[in-house]
Amino acid sequence: MRLRPGFLKVTRQQRPFSTNAFKNGLNHGTKVVVAMSGGVDSSVTASILARSEKSLDLSAIFMRNWDTRDESGTEKGCEWEKDWEDVQRVCKLLDIPCRMIDLSREYWNRVFQPALEVWSHGQTPNPDVSCNREIKFGALLDTLKLQDGWLATGHYARLERSRASNSDTRHSDVDRVKLLRGVDPVKDQSYWLSSVSEAQIRRALFPIGHLSKGDVRKLAVDAGLPTASRRESMGICFVGKKRSFSSFLDGYLPPNPGTIVTLDGEVIARHQGLWHYTIGQNARISGRPKRMFVAAKRPEKNQLIVVDDRHHPELARLMIRVTGFRWIWDEHPPPEAFQAEGMPISVKFRSVMQPIPSVLRVRDRNKGEISFMDAQYGISPGQTAVVYLGAWCLGSGTIVE
Protein backbone atom coordinates (compact mmCIF):
# COMPACT_ATOMS: atom_id res chain seq x y z
CA MET A 1 0.00 0.00 0.00
CA ARG A 2 1.28 3.48 -0.91
CA LEU A 3 1.43 5.89 2.06
CA ARG A 4 1.13 9.63 2.01
CA PRO A 5 4.49 11.34 2.62
CA GLY A 6 3.39 12.97 5.87
CA PHE A 7 2.80 9.66 7.60
CA LEU A 8 6.40 8.52 7.50
CA LYS A 9 7.59 11.99 8.47
CA VAL A 10 5.43 12.16 11.61
CA THR A 11 6.12 8.62 12.79
CA ARG A 12 9.87 9.00 12.40
CA GLN A 13 9.95 12.30 14.26
CA GLN A 14 7.69 11.00 17.03
CA ARG A 15 8.97 7.48 17.61
CA PRO A 16 6.12 5.69 19.43
CA PHE A 17 8.14 3.41 21.67
CA SER A 18 9.86 5.87 23.97
CA THR A 19 9.18 3.54 26.92
CA ASN A 20 11.89 0.95 26.22
CA ALA A 21 9.38 -1.48 24.75
CA PHE A 22 11.75 -2.72 22.07
CA LYS A 23 14.52 -3.13 24.65
CA ASN A 24 12.26 -5.30 26.76
CA GLY A 25 11.24 -8.06 24.39
CA LEU A 26 9.54 -6.43 21.39
CA ASN A 27 11.69 -7.86 18.63
CA HIS A 28 11.22 -9.32 15.17
CA GLY A 29 8.47 -11.93 15.27
CA THR A 30 7.16 -10.87 18.70
CA LYS A 31 3.44 -11.51 19.15
CA VAL A 32 1.41 -8.33 19.64
CA VAL A 33 -2.39 -8.21 19.89
CA VAL A 34 -4.06 -4.82 19.42
CA ALA A 35 -7.33 -4.27 21.30
CA MET A 36 -9.39 -2.31 18.78
CA SER A 37 -12.66 -0.48 19.37
CA GLY A 38 -13.40 0.90 15.91
CA GLY A 39 -12.25 4.39 16.88
CA VAL A 40 -9.37 6.43 15.54
CA ASP A 41 -7.11 5.94 18.57
CA SER A 42 -6.93 2.15 18.40
CA SER A 43 -6.80 2.34 14.58
CA VAL A 44 -3.68 4.50 14.72
CA THR A 45 -2.23 2.20 17.37
CA ALA A 46 -2.59 -0.73 14.97
CA SER A 47 -1.21 1.35 12.10
CA ILE A 48 1.90 2.38 14.04
CA LEU A 49 2.64 -1.22 14.96
CA ALA A 50 1.93 -2.53 11.45
CA ARG A 51 4.46 -0.08 10.00
CA SER A 52 7.12 -0.39 12.70
CA GLU A 53 10.68 -1.32 11.89
CA LYS A 54 10.10 -4.73 13.45
CA SER A 55 8.31 -7.54 11.65
CA LEU A 56 5.83 -8.28 14.39
CA ASP A 57 3.39 -11.16 14.66
CA LEU A 58 0.54 -8.67 14.73
CA SER A 59 -3.19 -9.28 15.07
CA ALA A 60 -6.23 -7.39 16.36
CA ILE A 61 -9.09 -8.26 18.66
CA PHE A 62 -12.45 -6.54 19.13
CA MET A 63 -14.28 -6.93 22.43
CA ARG A 64 -18.03 -7.10 22.48
CA ASN A 65 -18.86 -6.16 26.05
CA TRP A 66 -22.62 -5.71 25.91
CA ASP A 67 -25.37 -8.05 24.70
CA THR A 68 -27.91 -5.85 22.95
CA ARG A 69 -30.53 -8.57 23.31
CA ASP A 70 -30.78 -7.52 26.94
CA GLU A 71 -32.09 -4.18 25.72
CA SER A 72 -34.30 -4.88 22.73
CA GLY A 73 -34.66 -8.64 22.36
CA THR A 74 -32.76 -8.42 19.06
CA GLU A 75 -29.17 -7.96 17.90
CA LYS A 76 -29.97 -4.40 16.86
CA GLY A 77 -29.88 -1.14 18.77
CA CYS A 78 -26.19 -0.76 19.62
CA GLU A 79 -23.31 0.47 17.54
CA TRP A 80 -21.07 -2.51 18.21
CA GLU A 81 -21.82 -3.84 14.70
CA LYS A 82 -20.61 -0.57 13.16
CA ASP A 83 -17.56 -0.61 15.43
CA TRP A 84 -16.72 -4.19 14.40
CA GLU A 85 -17.19 -3.29 10.75
CA ASP A 86 -14.74 -0.38 11.10
CA VAL A 87 -12.21 -2.62 12.85
CA GLN A 88 -12.37 -5.06 9.94
CA ARG A 89 -11.94 -2.27 7.40
CA VAL A 90 -8.85 -0.92 9.15
CA CYS A 91 -7.33 -4.37 9.55
CA LYS A 92 -7.95 -5.18 5.90
CA LEU A 93 -6.12 -1.98 4.94
CA LEU A 94 -3.21 -2.83 7.26
CA ASP A 95 -3.24 -6.49 6.20
CA ILE A 96 -3.50 -7.89 9.72
CA PRO A 97 -5.92 -10.58 10.98
CA CYS A 98 -8.67 -9.65 13.41
CA ARG A 99 -11.32 -11.42 15.40
CA MET A 100 -14.14 -10.62 17.79
CA ILE A 101 -14.46 -11.94 21.33
CA ASP A 102 -17.70 -11.85 23.31
CA LEU A 103 -17.02 -10.72 26.89
CA SER A 104 -20.54 -9.51 27.59
CA ARG A 105 -21.12 -12.07 30.34
CA GLU A 106 -17.87 -11.10 32.07
CA TYR A 107 -18.75 -7.41 31.75
CA TRP A 108 -22.19 -7.99 33.21
CA ASN A 109 -20.95 -10.00 36.19
CA ARG A 110 -17.70 -8.15 36.97
CA VAL A 111 -18.52 -4.56 36.02
CA PHE A 112 -22.19 -3.78 35.45
CA GLN A 113 -23.86 -5.68 38.30
CA PRO A 114 -21.45 -4.33 40.95
CA ALA A 115 -22.00 -0.81 39.56
CA LEU A 116 -25.77 -1.28 39.73
CA GLU A 117 -25.46 -2.11 43.41
CA VAL A 118 -23.57 1.14 44.00
CA TRP A 119 -26.06 3.21 41.97
CA SER A 120 -28.96 1.67 43.90
CA HIS A 121 -27.49 3.11 47.12
CA GLY A 122 -27.34 6.60 45.65
CA GLN A 123 -23.61 6.68 44.97
CA THR A 124 -21.74 7.42 41.72
CA PRO A 125 -19.55 4.51 40.58
CA ASN A 126 -17.11 4.60 37.68
CA PRO A 127 -17.60 1.42 35.60
CA ASP A 128 -14.97 2.47 33.05
CA VAL A 129 -12.25 2.21 35.72
CA SER A 130 -13.33 -1.28 36.73
CA CYS A 131 -13.77 -2.26 33.06
CA ASN A 132 -10.08 -1.73 32.35
CA ARG A 133 -9.11 -3.76 35.41
CA GLU A 134 -11.68 -6.54 35.09
CA ILE A 135 -12.17 -6.83 31.33
CA LYS A 136 -9.48 -5.35 29.09
CA PHE A 137 -6.57 -6.18 31.39
CA GLY A 138 -8.47 -8.97 33.13
CA ALA A 139 -10.78 -11.28 31.19
CA LEU A 140 -9.25 -10.38 27.83
CA LEU A 141 -5.68 -11.04 28.98
CA ASP A 142 -6.78 -14.28 30.61
CA THR A 143 -8.36 -15.40 27.33
CA LEU A 144 -5.43 -14.38 25.13
CA LYS A 145 -2.80 -16.16 27.24
CA LEU A 146 -0.09 -14.01 25.70
CA GLN A 147 2.80 -15.35 27.80
CA ASP A 148 5.72 -13.63 26.02
CA GLY A 149 3.41 -11.55 23.81
CA TRP A 150 2.09 -8.02 24.26
CA LEU A 151 -1.33 -6.33 24.40
CA ALA A 152 -1.45 -2.90 22.74
CA THR A 153 -4.26 -0.41 23.30
CA GLY A 154 -5.11 3.11 22.19
CA HIS A 155 -4.94 4.66 25.65
CA TYR A 156 -3.47 8.13 26.10
CA ALA A 157 -1.11 6.99 28.83
CA ARG A 158 2.56 6.04 29.04
CA LEU A 159 4.60 3.25 30.59
CA GLU A 160 8.08 3.69 31.99
CA ARG A 161 10.11 0.50 32.34
CA SER A 162 13.27 -0.08 34.35
CA ARG A 163 15.14 -2.95 35.93
CA ALA A 164 14.45 -3.57 39.60
CA SER A 165 17.16 -2.35 41.96
CA ASN A 166 19.50 -4.87 43.57
CA SER A 167 17.83 -4.23 46.94
CA ASP A 168 14.38 -5.08 45.56
CA THR A 169 14.47 -8.82 46.20
CA ARG A 170 10.76 -9.31 45.42
CA HIS A 171 11.13 -8.01 41.86
CA SER A 172 14.78 -8.72 41.06
CA ASP A 173 14.00 -10.88 38.03
CA VAL A 174 11.46 -8.58 36.32
CA ASP A 175 11.15 -5.07 34.94
CA ARG A 176 9.39 -2.48 37.09
CA VAL A 177 6.63 -0.66 35.22
CA LYS A 178 5.29 2.78 36.07
CA LEU A 179 2.01 4.07 34.68
CA LEU A 180 2.45 7.70 33.63
CA ARG A 181 0.00 10.35 32.51
CA GLY A 182 -0.41 10.84 28.78
CA VAL A 183 1.36 13.82 27.24
CA ASP A 184 -1.92 15.36 26.10
CA PRO A 185 -3.35 16.86 29.32
CA VAL A 186 -6.88 16.89 27.90
CA LYS A 187 -6.88 13.32 26.62
CA ASP A 188 -4.81 11.72 29.40
CA GLN A 189 -6.45 8.38 30.29
CA SER A 190 -4.30 7.27 33.22
CA TYR A 191 -7.40 7.94 35.36
CA TRP A 192 -9.22 5.04 33.69
CA LEU A 193 -6.21 2.73 34.15
CA SER A 194 -5.55 3.65 37.77
CA SER A 195 -6.83 0.42 39.37
CA VAL A 196 -4.88 -2.09 37.25
CA SER A 197 -1.92 -3.87 38.82
CA GLU A 198 1.68 -3.74 37.70
CA ALA A 199 1.38 -7.37 36.62
CA GLN A 200 -1.57 -6.53 34.38
CA ILE A 201 0.30 -3.81 32.48
CA ARG A 202 3.74 -5.45 32.43
CA ARG A 203 3.05 -6.78 28.91
CA ALA A 204 1.08 -3.71 27.75
CA LEU A 205 1.93 -1.18 25.04
CA PHE A 206 0.45 2.32 24.72
CA PRO A 207 1.91 3.50 21.38
CA ILE A 208 0.01 6.83 21.27
CA GLY A 209 0.55 7.91 24.88
CA HIS A 210 3.20 10.46 23.90
CA LEU A 211 0.97 12.01 21.20
CA SER A 212 -1.78 14.61 21.26
CA LYS A 213 -5.20 13.95 19.81
CA GLY A 214 -4.27 16.26 16.93
CA ASP A 215 -1.18 14.17 16.23
CA VAL A 216 -3.28 11.02 16.18
CA ARG A 217 -5.82 12.53 13.79
CA LYS A 218 -3.01 13.61 11.48
CA LEU A 219 -1.47 10.14 11.49
CA ALA A 220 -4.86 8.62 10.68
CA VAL A 221 -5.41 10.99 7.75
CA ASP A 222 -1.89 10.54 6.39
CA ALA A 223 -2.23 6.75 6.62
CA GLY A 224 -5.60 6.85 4.84
CA LEU A 225 -7.36 5.03 7.66
CA PRO A 226 -11.14 4.71 7.15
CA THR A 227 -11.71 5.83 10.74
CA ALA A 228 -9.69 9.06 10.38
CA SER A 229 -12.74 11.32 10.39
CA ARG A 230 -14.85 9.28 12.77
CA ARG A 231 -16.35 11.36 15.55
CA GLU A 232 -15.20 10.61 19.05
CA SER A 233 -17.57 8.54 21.14
CA MET A 234 -18.50 10.47 24.29
CA GLY A 235 -21.23 8.19 25.59
CA ILE A 236 -21.79 4.56 26.45
CA CYS A 237 -22.79 2.42 23.50
CA PHE A 238 -25.47 0.35 25.20
CA VAL A 239 -27.29 3.39 26.60
CA GLY A 240 -28.25 4.49 23.11
CA LYS A 241 -28.75 7.96 21.65
CA LYS A 242 -32.41 8.53 22.43
CA ARG A 243 -32.38 8.44 26.23
CA SER A 244 -30.47 9.68 29.21
CA PHE A 245 -28.23 7.54 31.36
CA SER A 246 -30.63 7.80 34.31
CA SER A 247 -33.46 6.56 32.06
CA PHE A 248 -31.24 3.64 31.07
CA LEU A 249 -30.70 2.77 34.73
CA ASP A 250 -34.47 2.89 35.31
CA GLY A 251 -34.65 -0.29 33.24
CA TYR A 252 -32.51 -2.13 35.79
CA LEU A 253 -33.37 -0.49 39.12
CA PRO A 254 -36.92 -0.52 40.56
CA PRO A 255 -38.52 2.87 41.26
CA ASN A 256 -37.62 4.24 44.67
CA PRO A 257 -39.40 7.58 45.12
CA GLY A 258 -38.35 9.92 47.91
CA THR A 259 -38.27 13.55 48.93
CA ILE A 260 -36.13 16.50 47.87
CA VAL A 261 -35.49 18.79 50.83
CA THR A 262 -33.64 22.00 51.67
CA LEU A 263 -31.01 22.22 54.40
CA ASP A 264 -33.65 23.28 56.94
CA GLY A 265 -35.77 20.24 56.12
CA GLU A 266 -38.42 21.81 53.88
CA VAL A 267 -39.80 19.33 51.35
CA ILE A 268 -39.89 21.08 47.97
CA ALA A 269 -40.21 18.20 45.49
CA ARG A 270 -40.00 14.44 45.02
CA HIS A 271 -37.51 12.26 43.18
CA GLN A 272 -37.93 8.84 41.57
CA GLY A 273 -34.56 7.44 42.58
CA LEU A 274 -31.32 8.86 43.97
CA TRP A 275 -29.38 7.46 40.98
CA HIS A 276 -30.94 10.20 38.84
CA TYR A 277 -28.70 12.79 40.52
CA THR A 278 -25.02 13.54 41.07
CA ILE A 279 -23.58 15.81 43.74
CA GLY A 280 -23.20 19.36 42.42
CA GLN A 281 -25.58 19.04 39.49
CA ASN A 282 -28.61 21.21 38.81
CA ALA A 283 -31.55 19.39 40.41
CA ARG A 284 -33.93 20.94 37.82
CA ILE A 285 -36.76 21.68 40.21
CA SER A 286 -39.49 23.72 38.58
CA GLY A 287 -41.25 26.60 40.26
CA ARG A 288 -38.28 27.77 42.31
CA PRO A 289 -37.00 31.38 42.18
CA LYS A 290 -33.40 30.13 41.90
CA ARG A 291 -31.76 27.02 40.52
CA MET A 292 -31.23 24.30 43.13
CA PHE A 293 -28.13 22.12 43.24
CA VAL A 294 -27.64 18.68 44.74
CA ALA A 295 -25.61 19.03 47.95
CA ALA A 296 -25.96 15.57 49.46
CA LYS A 297 -27.88 12.31 49.48
CA ARG A 298 -29.27 10.58 52.54
CA PRO A 299 -29.89 7.00 51.41
CA GLU A 300 -31.12 5.93 54.86
CA LYS A 301 -34.00 8.42 54.50
CA ASN A 302 -34.08 8.30 50.69
CA GLN A 303 -33.68 12.08 50.67
CA LEU A 304 -31.99 14.42 48.26
CA ILE A 305 -30.58 17.59 49.89
CA VAL A 306 -30.43 20.72 47.71
CA VAL A 307 -28.98 24.24 48.02
CA ASP A 308 -29.39 27.36 45.92
CA ASP A 309 -25.73 27.97 44.95
CA ARG A 310 -23.33 25.69 43.10
CA HIS A 311 -20.55 27.07 45.36
CA HIS A 312 -22.52 26.73 48.57
CA PRO A 313 -20.39 25.81 51.63
CA GLU A 314 -22.28 22.50 51.86
CA LEU A 315 -20.70 21.52 48.53
CA ALA A 316 -17.16 22.46 49.55
CA ARG A 317 -14.71 19.77 50.62
CA LEU A 318 -11.23 20.20 52.08
CA MET A 319 -10.84 16.48 52.73
CA ILE A 320 -12.20 13.20 51.44
CA ARG A 321 -12.10 9.71 52.89
CA VAL A 322 -11.11 6.97 50.48
CA THR A 323 -11.38 3.20 50.80
CA GLY A 324 -10.68 0.19 48.61
CA PHE A 325 -7.33 1.52 47.43
CA ARG A 326 -5.81 -0.46 44.58
CA TRP A 327 -2.10 0.32 44.32
CA ILE A 328 -0.42 -0.45 41.00
CA TRP A 329 2.79 -1.48 42.76
CA ASP A 330 2.08 -4.16 45.34
CA GLU A 331 4.45 -2.60 47.92
CA HIS A 332 2.63 0.75 47.90
CA PRO A 333 1.48 3.05 49.41
CA PRO A 334 4.91 4.60 50.04
CA PRO A 335 5.99 4.74 53.72
CA GLU A 336 5.61 8.54 53.81
CA ALA A 337 1.83 8.15 53.50
CA PHE A 338 1.72 6.48 56.94
CA GLN A 339 3.38 9.43 58.67
CA ALA A 340 1.31 11.92 60.65
CA GLU A 341 2.23 14.77 58.30
CA GLY A 342 1.22 12.67 55.31
CA MET A 343 2.69 12.51 51.82
CA PRO A 344 2.41 15.35 49.27
CA ILE A 345 0.65 14.07 46.15
CA SER A 346 -1.72 15.31 43.48
CA VAL A 347 -5.15 13.81 42.95
CA LYS A 348 -7.93 13.59 40.38
CA PHE A 349 -11.51 12.72 41.31
CA ARG A 350 -12.83 13.31 37.77
CA SER A 351 -11.25 12.07 34.57
CA VAL A 352 -11.28 15.47 32.83
CA MET A 353 -9.77 17.56 35.62
CA GLN A 354 -6.10 18.36 36.11
CA PRO A 355 -4.46 16.83 39.21
CA ILE A 356 -4.65 19.13 42.22
CA PRO A 357 -2.07 19.42 45.06
CA SER A 358 -3.08 17.31 48.05
CA VAL A 359 -1.77 15.35 51.02
CA LEU A 360 -2.34 11.62 51.46
CA ARG A 361 -2.57 9.98 54.88
CA VAL A 362 -3.33 6.27 55.05
CA ARG A 363 -4.47 4.23 58.03
CA ASP A 364 -3.65 0.95 56.36
CA ARG A 365 -3.06 -0.18 52.80
CA ASN A 366 -6.75 -0.01 51.91
CA LYS A 367 -8.06 3.25 53.30
CA GLY A 368 -7.04 6.78 54.13
CA GLU A 369 -7.71 10.48 53.80
CA ILE A 370 -6.80 12.99 51.11
CA SER A 371 -6.63 16.66 52.12
CA PHE A 372 -6.81 19.48 49.57
CA MET A 373 -4.96 22.78 49.59
CA ASP A 374 -8.11 24.55 48.35
CA ALA A 375 -11.77 23.67 48.71
CA GLN A 376 -13.15 21.38 45.99
CA TYR A 377 -16.77 21.20 44.91
CA GLY A 378 -19.16 18.56 43.61
CA ILE A 379 -17.43 15.44 44.97
CA SER A 380 -19.65 12.35 45.11
CA PRO A 381 -19.30 9.18 47.19
CA GLY A 382 -18.54 6.32 44.81
CA GLN A 383 -16.29 8.38 42.56
CA THR A 384 -12.72 7.25 41.94
CA ALA A 385 -9.88 9.25 43.52
CA VAL A 386 -6.60 8.75 41.63
CA VAL A 387 -3.25 9.39 43.31
CA TYR A 388 -0.23 10.83 41.45
CA LEU A 389 3.39 11.66 42.20
CA GLY A 390 4.11 14.08 39.40
CA ALA A 391 3.20 12.20 36.22
CA TRP A 392 3.39 8.81 37.97
CA CYS A 393 0.01 7.24 38.73
CA LEU A 394 0.27 5.24 41.97
CA GLY A 395 -3.26 3.86 42.11
CA SER A 396 -6.77 4.77 43.13
CA GLY A 397 -9.58 4.18 45.59
CA THR A 398 -13.27 4.88 46.08
CA ILE A 399 -14.51 8.04 47.78
CA VAL A 400 -16.79 7.21 50.69
CA GLU A 401 -17.35 10.71 52.12
Image: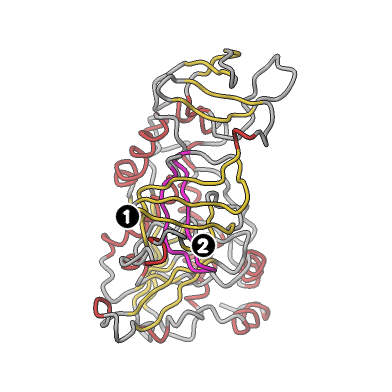
Chief secondary structure of the magenta portion: strand
Q: Position of residue 361 (x, y in %)?
A: 43, 56
Q: Would you name the residue on which mark 2 appears?
A: 345
Quarter of the image with the N terminus in it: bottom right
Q: Secondary structure at mark 2?
A: strand
Q: Which mark is residue 239?
A: none
Q: Residue furthest right?
A: 289
Q: Name the image quarter holding residue 212.
A: bottom right
Residue at x 44% of width, y 83% of height: 20
Number of callouts:
2
Q: Position of residue 323 (x, y in %)?
A: 37, 47
- Asked whether 158 falls inside the magenta stretch, the response is no
Give, as a three-letter code, the residue at label 1: Asp
Mark 2 Cα shell of 10 Å, populated few (<14), some (14-19), many (≥20): many
Using residue 143 as the reference point, say whether residue 38 is left or right of it. right
Q: Position of residue 56 (x, y in %)?
A: 40, 80
Above/below status of 262 relative to 230: above
Q: Which residues are magenta?
A: 381-399
Q: Are marks 2 and 1 in contact (CB under 8 Å)?
A: no
Residue at x 33% of width, y 37% of height: 113
Above/below status of 175 relative to 61: below
Q: Would you name the residue on which mark 1 appears?
A: 364
Question: Which is nearer the eye, 316 or 139?
Answer: 316
Question: Which is nearer the eye, 4 or 278?
Answer: 278
Q: Name the image quarter holding residue 9.
A: bottom right
Q: Position of residue 285 (x, y in %)?
A: 64, 19
Residue at x 39% of width, y 56% of height: 195
Using residue 67 as the reference point, say whether residue 83 is left or right of it. right
Question: Which is nearer the eye, 199 or 345?
Answer: 345
Give, as a three-letter code, the residue at label 2: Ile
- Asked whether 394 falls inside the magenta stretch, the response is yes
- Report, in whole angstroms, how far the alpha carbon at label 2 lies from the one at label 1: 17 Å
